[in-house]
Image (cartoon, helix red, strand yellow):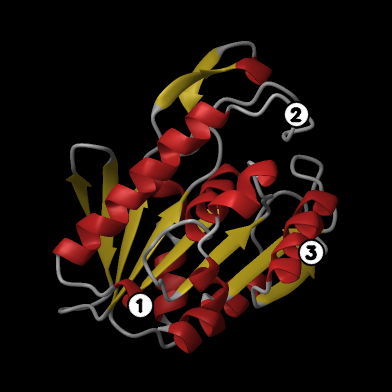
Amino acid sequence: MSPNSNPSIECVVVETGPNPTACVIWLHGLGADGYDFVPIVKELEQMGLPNTRFVFPHAPKIPVSINGGYVMRAWYDIKNVDLQRQEDEGGIRQSQASLEQLINDQIELGFKAEQIVLAGFSQGGAIVYQTGVRTQHKLAGLIALSTYLPCESALDGEMNPENIRIPVLAAHGEQDNIVLMERGEKAVKLLLEKGFSVDWHTYPMAHSVCGEEVVEIANFLKKVL
């Protein structure tokens, strides 16, 4: 495990073996950091993944309105508990650009776009959706956990029609009171209407990740990578 930085964003990098043939860029949620999902690598590795490079970026530290302006790591500001009202579109698009840069960094290191999966939890998942449906890269897949689709009104004019071929795994907790499951369902419904192939799972949990979900993530990664 080692820190890695580029001009846009600092990351933690974990490789499960020499000469990795796949790459997963995984974005954390509000107030966490890149180390948050590092422990999941061991679990996934034990489930038979190919040698994989995991890139866990740190979100920038910014004041978050809904938390009284407290400075924390966040991919964008949240101004309303509704999440999709008063959206911080500028912050969302800035993080989208950072994620695009990370994708380009991995391609420059030798990975092909079709060897790269974007994964994210909560706020990180929102940036995965935002970027994954718009990018010009033909990625291996998207994993969106306990999240929702930001900037919905701009989707039709900005999505890359070619990306409907990118497989999507979406999962949500049925007792989630941070990002309501209805938000996750709404995102999946909209993507299905656009022609995306979305594998949707729900679990009896709150705003978190459970063991059964990790198994589903491993199965998805083995399939697309």
Which of the labelled discs sits on residue 189, or is there none?
3
- In this view, the residue farthest toward the top is 68
Residue receiving disc 2: 85
| Residue type indicated by callout 1 | Glu
Upstream in the sequence, badge 1 or badge 2? Answer: 2
Measured as percent of width and height from the top left, residue 183 is found at 79, 49
* Quadrant that contains the C terminus: bottom left
Upstream in the sequence, badge 3 or badge 1? Answer: 1
Report, in whole angstroms, how far the alpha carbon at label 3 lies from the one at label 1.
25 Å
Discs 3, 2 touching: Cβ within 8 Å = no
| Residue type indicated by callout 2 | Arg
Quick one: SS at disc 1? helix
154 to 67, vertically: above or below: below
Q: Residues within 10 Å of mark 2 (few under 14, many from 20)?
A: few
Which of the labelled discs sits on residue 114, or is there none?
1
116 to the left or right of 68: left
| Residue type indicated by callout 3 | Lys
Upstream in the sequence, badge 3 or badge 2? Answer: 2
Relative depth, front residue between 137 and 103: 137
Q: Residues within 10 Å of mark 1 (few under 14, many from 20)?
A: some
133 to the left or right of 67: left
5 to 22, vertically: above or below: above
Q: Residue at x 68, y 77 (%)?
A: 199
Measured as percent of width and height from the top left, residue 154 is found at 63, 44
- In this view, the residue farthest toward the front is 157
Q: Residues within 10 Å of mark 3 (few under 14, many from 20)?
A: some
Q: Residue at x 66, y 49 (%)?
A: 149
18 to 132, vertically: above or below: below
